[in-house]
Image (spheres, rainbow, N blue to C red):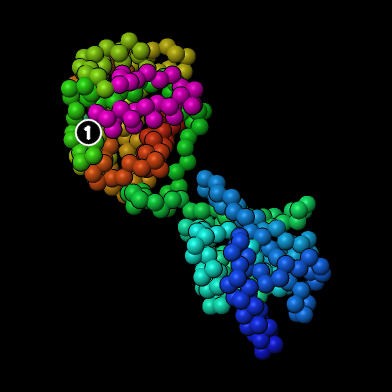
Amino acid sequence: MMTSPGRALFNSALVFLLALHLFFLSGPVRTDAADNAGSAAGSQSGAISTATLRIGKHVNYLRLVLETPEDYVQRASVSLAGANTVKIDFQSPVSFRVPQKDAPKLLVKVEAVVSKSVVYEMDKGLGITVFMNGCIINIDNLDDINVSKLSSPSRLVIDAYMKQTTSAGSENFSAEEPLTSPDASDIKMQSFVIDAGHGGYDSGVRFRKTVEKDLALSFAKEFSSELLKREKKVTLTRKADQTLSVKDRARIVNMKSPDLLISIHVSSREEFVVYSFYKPHIRTSGENGANSEKSAGVDRSEAVAQAIARSAGNALKISVGTEKLPLLLLTSVHVPAVLIELPSPDKFSYNGKSRERLITIILQGIAYSSTSQVGA
Ligand SMILES: [Zn+2]
């Protein structure tokens, strides 16, 4: 695009100088041949300004800050140049100072960048290739960028937003369905009892690295804290590893009389199943808090079960289903109730991100079941 013989020659000379220079450096990373403090006009006579790159890591984006003279910042053009690639062109010769990943291999890597246009890895999934007037930055999972030009000190700020994670276990989730966590106001139900299945002498299903009672409890606690964040009333049937009969659980539920009971279990299969059971004389929560006997047709428990399964079906790649089953807990309580069997941890990753997404799926289902109730 911009290759003239003269420029190529200049490039080669620059590359040679850089390589030589770097070879004798032992301090911080420098890919600059000369630290020119004078004119930054960018003439080909060798006045080269330096751009110092700093990287800030945020939850779902990287902030790249390039500190360089004012006129460079003003002239700079930043563009997405293909998958995972940001191209920064300062329109004038520039050299870079970039973060180092690990010091011992530093010189080799930087030299490789300038002499062979090989990507220098600054961090995991983050590489830079420098060229005459700028650089190309490769960012794994790059989705979009936002660029701003700021002064004192003059700098170019590029926020690089990443796609939804592709870390281990995400193969269980559909990438194309972004999950948005419902707000407090999206969830019409105000009070919940969360039941962690099993406990104490009753371990439930045994997995390779854990048992059902432990996974159910930790998940129930995380789920409860998400409801608490949304200022809902939450009761856990058990907060520790204790034996609790179904009768005891049902007693807690009926005493609290929540808008919804969610019982958490974990199956030995790679599937997500929501159980409910039709109860002919179930209480439904009215807007004014008054209890009204349910009328024929819509069963709240089943509506919630189906809404959660729909949300799960959209977001999970594993098998998702609902089932009506007269499970003892479901038939012993007087409030809408669902029992969720989460997928086996031997077949489904329970890393932080996956757990968060499972919680969001359930919250979405609850929120959806509220809106679908409107007008009923
Ligand atoms: Zn169980």
In the shown orientation, is residue 246 left or right of residue 114?
left
Q: Residue at x 18, y 24 (%)?
A: 202
Ligand number 1: quarter of image: top left
Is the C-beta of the residue carrying label 1 under 8 Å from the nearest atom of ligand 1? no
Q: Residue at x 18, y 34 (%)?
A: 205
Q: Which residues are magenta?
A: 213-240
Identify residue type, mark 1.
Val
Q: Position of residue 278 (x, y in %)?
A: 24, 24
Mark 1 falls on what kind of element?
loop
Q: Position of residue 190 (x, y in %)?
A: 44, 21
Question: In which quadrant is the C terminus drawn?
Answer: top left
In the shown orientation, is residue 74 left or right of residue 309?
right
Around disc 1, counting alpha carbons within 10 Å, would you say few (fewer than 14), some (14 to 19), or many (20 or more)? some
The answer to whether residue 328 is seen in the rendering is: yes
Given residues 34 and 300, the one toward you in this image is 34
Q: Position of residue 284 (x, y in %)?
A: 36, 18
The answer to whether residue 1 is seen in the rendering is: no
Q: Indicate yes or no whether the magenta region holds residue 238.
A: yes
Q: Residue furthest right?
A: 39
Which residue is under mark 1?
Answer: 211
Q: Position of residue 132 (x, y in %)?
A: 66, 75
Given residues 131 and 95, the one toward you in this image is 95
Judge whether 70 appears above or below 374 on screen.
below
Given residues 220 and 187, the one toward you in this image is 220
Question: In which quadrant is the N terminus drawn?
Answer: bottom right
Judge whether 143 appears above or below 329 on screen.
below
Q: Residue at x 53, y 78 (%)?
A: 116
